[in-house]
Amino acid sequence: MSAMPLFNPFPNAPGVTDLGDGRRLVETNDKGHCIRMIEPDGTVSMVISKDSPTPPPKPAGTGKYHVRHTHDGQEVIDPEGNVYARTKEQDKADHIANLLIVYERMMARKASSGA
């Protein structure tokens, strides 16, 4: 029985693997060591990050929407952990969370007034 040849997952230039169907895996170090899946249209469909910290715990708060800080920016989430928005700017995340809270209150008042 012959030995199986070893498969090199990065046969191309260092840090780039062409998957043959137009997609590429690109190794980067811009936000820690990670590998990105680049689709044929140039969009990033997946990021695997080796250096990522574990996600922070869900925030405890009184409002329905909260800003959760991640290694890549901020996320606006509800208490169940559903993500409503992602941004890299803290002030925008706070503003989006406040707008969602105001909108929810406005809809509750409208429903209670029978309008």
Image (tube, rainbow, N blue to C red):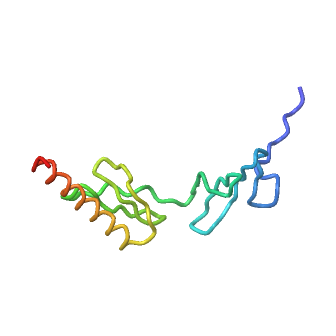
- Residue 96, position as x, y percentages in the image: 33, 65
* Viewer-nearest residue: 27 or 95: 95
Report the side of 2 relative to 109 (left or right).
right
Report the side of 55 relative to 65 (left or right).
right
Identify the residue at horizontal 67%, vertical 55% (top origin). Answer: 38
Report the side of 1 relative to 42 (left or right).
right
Identify the residue at horizontal 58%, vertical 55% (top origin). Answer: 47
Name above or below for residue 73 compared with residue 79: below
* Viewer-nearest residue: 23 or 98: 98
Among the 4 quarters of the image, the one containing residue 104: bottom left
Q: Residue furthest right?
A: 2
Q: Quadrant of the N terminus?
A: top right
- Residue 57, position as x, y percentages in the image: 34, 55
Among the 4 quarters of the image, the one containing residue 55: bottom left
* Viewer-nearest residue: 101 or 29: 101
Name above or below for residue 87 compared with residue 1: below
Among the 4 quarters of the image, the one containing residue 87: bottom left
Q: Residue furthest left?
A: 113
Q: Residue furthest front?
A: 115
- Residue 41, position as x, y percentages in the image: 69, 55
* Viewer-nearest residue: 95 or 90: 95
Identify the residue at horizontal 72%, vertical 53% (top origin). Answer: 24
- Count of numbered circles on the image: 0
